[in-house]
Amino acid sequence: MIRRPDRRPTVALDLPAPPPSASDARKLSQVRTKSVHFEIDVRRLAQTLLSRANFPSPFPRPMLPLLVTLLASLFLTATAAFPAAQPNVIVIMADDLGFGDLSCYGATAFKTPHIDQLAAEGLRFTSGYSTASTCTPTRYSFLTGSYAFRRKGTGIAPPNGHLVVPPDAFTIADLAKTAGYRTAVIGKWHLGLGIEGRGPDWNGSIKPGPREIGFDYNFLLPTTNDRVPQVYVESDRVVGLDPNDPLWVGDRKPAEDHPTGISHRTTLKMDWSHGHNGTIHNGISRIGFYTGGEAARFRDEDLADKWAEKSNAWLEANRNHPFFLFLASHDLHVPRIPHERFQGVTGLGYRADSIVQLDWQVGELMRTLDRLGLTDKTLIVFCSDNGPVMDDGYKDLALEKRGQHRAGGPYRGGKYSVYEGGTRTPFITHWKGRITPGVSDEIVSTIDLAASLAALTGTPLPADACLDSFDVSAALLGRPGARGREHLVQQDNGGDGNFGFRVGQWKLVRYDTKSARNLVVEQTLATTKVPQFQLFDLAKDPFETTDVLAQHPEKGEELRGRLAALIAAGRSR
Ligand SMILES: [Ca+2]
């Protein structure tokens, strides 16, 4: 069933305290609408009172302006008692940022002052999660509000991959549009483009893409930067493409003498360690091959500046409308090539330098919001798409130069794993004047942002959409007594039957493959043999070192059964 949002106008009022639940929000939204109509009635009444010379009034005519003022004051007081907050929303999603990668989360080897400020003025979550431990499935789940494991083909998207979000899916962007927001995605996409079986038409109109699933505007790195091609896509076109130099993208070498990371390895400015040895651009070889489009190609060093430029421009242009911005930084995914001004700033290599660049980008965004007077009207959610990895295909010395820095903080495993470090990541909410600063231990996930935005805006979710998204808006805003999720499924790239299932302090780890990738972040990327099922008590053992399945067989059985039922049910909302 195709469900496109109605573009009904939205009344954006700047009023305090968001509602605690979706149903309450809807009711309050109705109240708000009535209040606005009441405001119009008051004004009409006032005009009538003042214009009718022979109006029979119990008050002397000189008192009428005072009466009108009093009525207006009463109206404003009454309206303020019915909270109907519709904040602008910006989701900043970092890439491969681990729980321990920010100074506000315990990093000491370098500082992230802007993100720290965000945390100090907002809410810092200790149990904030990405939904998966790789890029594409987390982004899919964030947009659709449904677990990626429920849909085949949602693993890491290849260079010519088609759009993995079905165009008829109801997305968080559709939701925002339904609520009257203007919507944009700027940054890394990596959800594929174009129709199934064909993929993107790089030299023509690239559809379907973000505009077909709810975004008014997009400026994208279409895949991820260790994959080809290095071009931007704005709306449905490659930016700056010369039609006389068409772009070709493929998974096979186009000619015998095509330079690659293998044939021209000694010329590379950053060597590869595994894979990533196809076409060379900017001195770096990538996954996949491409030719042409020379005028359209970007420099890796300039990505963060481009995201800042485009997001600032879009915010400026939409400053007077409710807006929803998905700002997807490429930092700190490989190849980690920060701008020259950030290269070497930490002494820990380009991985940490890229975190400082990410921090700069957050600072730029905050400065823009302050300049536009939008900071107290905007809910910012800062999160990551998955946990950390050191050597992810390039010899950038992330491992050798890390010193004592632990990217996963106190947690085990990283990107590609379903141990805590794979998905428990930095998660910060910020809304000046509306969120009381603090730290929250409530469980929240990127998949919950859809249902939570629905609640915040008083917009009903279709019953058959966002199948695993829960309204945790009260927890995101730190309201007293608010609860997050009761349970959470963690997945890897998907398709292999590997899951983490957290229920409160208990965590079931299920590896149908009986092997876990990136179990130890601080070593060369490897797979480790593990039992199919393990049980951990996160309250006593947050590092997941001691399997207590033998001591608590009934708890293990309970969680295995619940996980299996949740998967079989096709939905958890
Ligand atoms: Ca990622």
Image: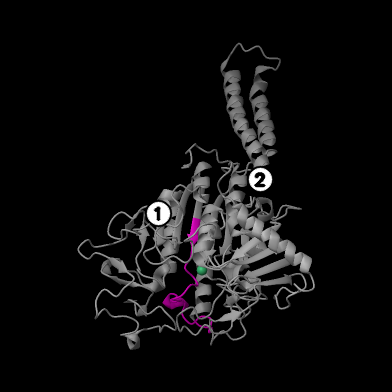
271 relative to 118, above or below: below
Region of the chain picked out in magenta, as a range: 326-349
Q: Which amino acid does label 2 sit on?
A: Pro
Secondary element type, mark 2? loop
Q: Is residue 483 left or right of residue 54?
A: right
| Mark number displayed over residue 276 | none
Task: Pick the residue in front: 123 or 441.
Answer: 441
Sooner in the amino-acid sequence: mark 2 or mark 1? 2
Q: Which mark is residue 16?
A: 2
Give the x, y percent position of residue 124. 66, 63
Query: Is the magenta region chiefly helix, strand or loop?
Result: loop
Identify the residue at the far right of this view: 551
Query: Looking at the image, is 72 positioned above or below residue 161?
Result: above
Q: Describe the element under mark 1 as helix, strand or loop.
A: loop
Task: Inspect the magenta stretch and tell me whether residue 330 lies in it.
Answer: yes
Q: Residue furthest left?
A: 244
Q: Residue at x 22, y 61 (%)?
A: 243
The image quarter containing residue 386 is bottom right
Task: Inspect the magenta stretch and tell me whether residue 179 lies in it.
Answer: no
- Residue 299 visible to the viewer: yes
Q: Which residue is drawn at 22% across and 66% down?
A: 245
Q: Position of residue 401 (x, y in %)?
A: 54, 86
Picture residue at 29% right of the left edge, 62% below the top: 240
Q: Give the residue pinned by disc 1.
A: 209
Look at discs 2 and 1 and give the one toward the viewer: 1
Residue at x 31%, y 54% (from the top left corner): 205
Q: Distance between the residues labelled 2 and 1?
A: 36 Å
Looking at the picture, tell me which residue is in the foreground, 4 or 533: 533
Which amino acid, mark 1?
A: Gly
